[in-house]
Amino acid sequence: MIAVLADDFTGAAELAGIAVRYGLRVSLCLGEVKPTTADVLVVSTDSRSMSDAKALAVTSTIVQQILLLQPRWMYKKTDSVLRGYVMQELQLQMQLCNQTQALLLPANPTLGRTIEQGKYLVNKVPVHEAGFAADPEFPRTSAGLADMLGVEEIPVLEVGEALSHAAVMLASAATMQDVHHWANAVPAGIALAGAGDFFTALLARTYQEQLSSVIQLQQPFLYVCGTAFPAAVSFVQQVALMHPASVVWLSFVANGTKPHPDCVQQLAFALQHVGKVIFAIDATQIPAGCTAAQLRSCMADAVAQLFARQYVAEMFIEGGSTATSILEALQLHELQPQQEWERGSVRMKSNDCFISVKPGSYVLPPIIQQLFVA
């Protein structure tokens, strides 16, 4: 068995989708480890949305539970632009696994995210100038890798350079060929960490990609947009102008701690009469002092109330922490990955509902765009 530890749910789902692409049987768990006969066990800790102390405590518990299952190897899935407690969690995992070195490769060249000359670039633009400065919890204010990791320095290896004696090494990669180079260069026993491209290259050493099946969307269809990423916000605003009946904005009770009953009623009405709806946040209507965590809680509460009164055949969630909050509110702790929409978006099933997730910064699958703008 291969084990994957991810610090948010969309990251976990992304790697589950990659494993499905390679024909592997996958089990995806939230916040707890369950024995499995799957080829790949993916566990989401949601630690990125926690305090640093709680994140490390949760990581410690999950790693120790995974080790009891004796995986062949373990992969620490990090955010591609290094949001979260990347170094602290990786160093803790190394300690628990008795590993003295780690190779960290967060670049995703297939998505235009590269590490070149010691800088993190998104489509050749420094990461802090490419939309990630707006992240509410981990804004990227520099393209320097040490700054992004919150450390004074870190050795950055260029392609072809020998591994150093440092405990944690970060690998440069401008192309997928570079990523495959590192996947084939790492010695046995070293801790492996990074984003989706590195995991793909590691699987490709042993497995072959399989043909994917065509996805048929089910209705009533709920699309929950829980990200502040500019492209996602722009798309929702576009749909609201074109098809106002297909968008419901989160509204609050007076103190901003609970969703207003009206928005739940509006969601149910739209699903019954339109068959598809986007549930999103209007930044201009957020109560003063309302935190990102409170917004997620309100969205999750509203979705749970909706599911209690209205059948939802398919739900698509944008934003990892939002997805985790919603699945917790629905008391769903294990899902079965079915298909990969495209890179970063995976379709899973729980009971009689298809549930798909994607990171807020990834491109929305064209089939979803067409569903709402057609």
Image (cartoon, helix red, strand yellow):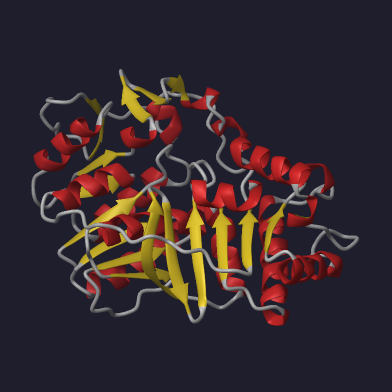
Say which quadrant the N terminus sits in.
Answer: bottom left
The residue drawn where x is 28% and y is 47% is 193
Q: From this view, report whether residue 121 is shown above or below residue 322.
A: above
Query: In the displayed structure, does residue 3 sit left or right of residue 44?
Result: left
The residue drawn where x is 20% and y is 35% is 166
Please say whether residue 229 is visible from this viewpoint.
yes
Query: In the displayed structure, does residue 30 sit left or right of residue 322?
Result: left
The residue drawn where x is 47% and y is 77% is 350
Q: From this view, report whether residue 285 is shown above or below residue 63.
A: above
Query: In the displayed structure, does residue 58 sit left or right of residue 205?
Result: right
View extreme (right): residue: 254
What is the count of numbered marks?
0
Please say whether residue 12 is visible from this viewpoint.
no
Residue situated in front as seen by the camera: 74 or 360: 360
Q: From this view, report whether residue 235 is shown above or below residue 301.
A: above
Q: Residue 77: x percent and y percent?
A: 34, 51
Residue situated in front as seen by the camera: 72 or 102: 72
Quadrant of the rendered image containing residue 50: bottom right
Q: Residue 284: x percent and y percent?
A: 82, 42
